[in-house]
Image: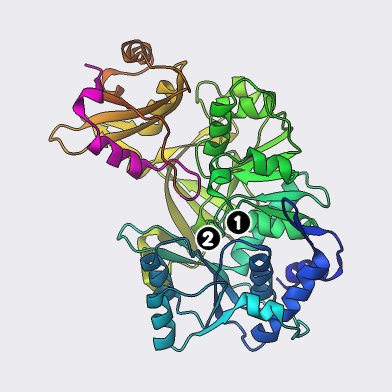
Amino acid sequence: MRTFYEEIYNIIRESSALCYKYYEDERFYPEFYENVLKLNSVLYLYKKKRITLYTDKSFETYCGVFAILLSGNTWIPVNPAFPEGRNLDILGITGPDLIITDCALPEKMRAFAVEHDISIINIKSILQEENKKDLVLGEFDRDDIAYIMFTSGSTGEPKGVPVTHNNYINFVRNAIEILPFQRREVFSDFHDLGFDISIFYLFCAVLTESALAPILKNEHRFFPLDNIVNNNITVWSSVPSVVSRIMMLRPEEEIDTSLKIVFLCGEPFRLDILKYCYENMRIKNVYNFYGLTETGVENFFHPCKPGDIQRFDEFGYVPIGKPLKGNTIKITKDRELLISGSQVTPGYLKGVGRDRFENIVGKTWFRTGDIVEKYEDVYFCKGRLDTQVKISGYRVELMDVEIQIKKYSTLQEAICFVDNNKEQKHLICAVQPEEGKEVDFKKLVNEINDELPEYMIPKKFFTIDKMPINDNGKIDRKAIRKLYSEIKSDTINESR
C-alpha cells in the first residue's frame, strides 16, 4: 500500500508537468504540491479520520482529494449540486470528523455539523494563506478505508460503500498495465467525483504524470466535443450514451480530436457506437469495462477490435470481456454474476444490504444482480435480474428486446419497461428517432416480428425527442416511466 502512495506523492512533488487544464486555465504540478502542503497544515492533525470534501470540481478540489488520502485519512466526496436532504443523509451515515468546503454549507447541514461537533474549514481560505506543513505519508493498512462512495438504495436512502486501499488499488494497477498510456496525457473528468469512475482518471492521471481536464458546464456534459477538442483531451472515460449523443448530432461527420484512448463503462455498449468510434472519431484504442462500486470500480474489461462489429453482431453489444486480475467470478444457475477477490468491499455502512454479500466456504462473494453469459472466451452482461420480467408466464430480458428494436433503421435509442398499472402486464417501449426522421411503427413491428416471439413484442410504443439522462450521463429509466404516465393516449402507438 505504502509503495503505491509513495509513487503518487513523488510525482506530485517532483514533476513540473501540466496537471490541470480547463481551456485557458492551466496549472502545473509544483502548484499542486504547494497546495497539498498548505492543506496538510490542517490535515496533519487528523489521522485515519473521515474527511468530507463538499466542493464543486476545481483544481483546488483535486488538491484536496490527494491531500486527504496522502495524509492517511478517508475521503468522502459530497456534491453541493445534489439535494440537501441526500447530502444530509450522507453526513449522518458517515459521521465525518471534518468538512472541507468551498462554499457556505446549507442551513441544515451546518446545524448537523454544529450538533455533532464536526469542524468546518474553507479550502480557499487555507490555500490563500502561506501556512504549510511537510507531508509525512500516513500509515496505510490494506484494510483501512480509503474513500466512501454512495449508491442509490432501494429504501430511498443512499447506501454508503466503504472502499479499502486494497479494494481499489488492484483496479488502478490493472488499468495502468492494460491501457497504452504515455506520459503527460490529458484525462477527461466527465462525471461527478462521487461516481466511482472518477477513481480511474484521478489516479491514472497522476501515475502517468498527466493532466485532468474537468467538465464544468451542463451543456458540455450533454455534448462534450467542445471540451474534448479545446482541452486537447487524449484519454476520455464516460458512458456509451455520451458517444451516442455525439453520433446523433453528427451522424455522418468525421470528428477530429486528440483522443487516443476511450474507456467506456456503466451501460451496455452498442456495436453501432463502437463503429462510430472507429470510423467517425478515428479512435484506435477503445475499451469496454464493467464493474460496481461495491467491487472496487471495474472487474471486467474488453479491448475492442474493428472485427468485433461483425463477430458480435447477433448480440448487438460489445462484451464485458474477461475478469481483471484479482477478481474471481461465479455464475449461478439463474445466471447471476457473483464476484470475489481483493476488490470486494467490506459491505455497506450501517449494516444495510447484508444479503448482497455472501460467505461461501470462507470467501466473501458479492451478488451483482446482473445476468451474465459466456460466449466463446468472453462474457456478456444480459441485463439485470430486476429488469428480467415475466410476460404471459415467459421470462423476458428487456435488454434482448431493446437490442432487436434498435436495429430498426431510423431509431437512435429504445428503452423497454413493464406497465404495472394493469392486472395484465404489458411491455412498453419508448423510442428516440434519429433527428429529423419519423418512425413507421407498423413497419417496426413487422420487422421485429421476424426476430421476436409475440410475447416479447411491446404492446405500446411512444416517442421521446430526447432520452432523459441522469447526473452520470446514463439514460434515466425512472424518468422515462414518469413521462409515459404523463403523456396523452393519442400519442401512444399500439402494436396489436
Residue 306 appearing in the image: no
Quadrant where the N terminus is found in the figure = bottom right
- Asked if residue 168 can be seen in this view, the reply is yes
Quadrant placement of the C terminus? top left
The reply to whether discs 2 and 1 touch (Cβ–Cβ < 8 Å) is yes
Disc 2, SS:
loop
Lateral position of residue 86 relative to residue 426, left or right: right
Look at the image and name its color scheme.
Answer: rainbow
Instruction: Examine the structure image and report whether residue 465 is included in the region drawn in magenta.
Output: no
**Residue 479 is a magenta residue:** yes
Residue 23, image x and y in percent? 72, 50
- Tell me where residue 275 sits by quadrant: top right
Q: Which mark is residue 194?
A: 2
* Magenta-drawn segment: 471-496
Residue 452 vs residue 56, the one in the foreground: 56
Q: Helix, strand, or loop for circle 1?
A: helix
Binning the other alpha carbons within 10 Å of mark 1 as few (below 14), some (14 to 19) or many (20 upward) gives: some
Mark 2: amino acid: Gly
Q: Position of residue 71 (x, y in %)?
A: 68, 79
- At 69% from the left and 69% from the top, the residue drawn is 63
Which residue type does callout 1 highlight? Ser
Q: Which label is found at residue 198?
A: 1
Which residue corresponds to the image point at 50% horizontal and 21% vertical from the top-left?
Answer: 314
Q: Nearer the viewer, residue 482 or 168?
A: 482
Relative placement, left or right, of 108 versus 323 is left
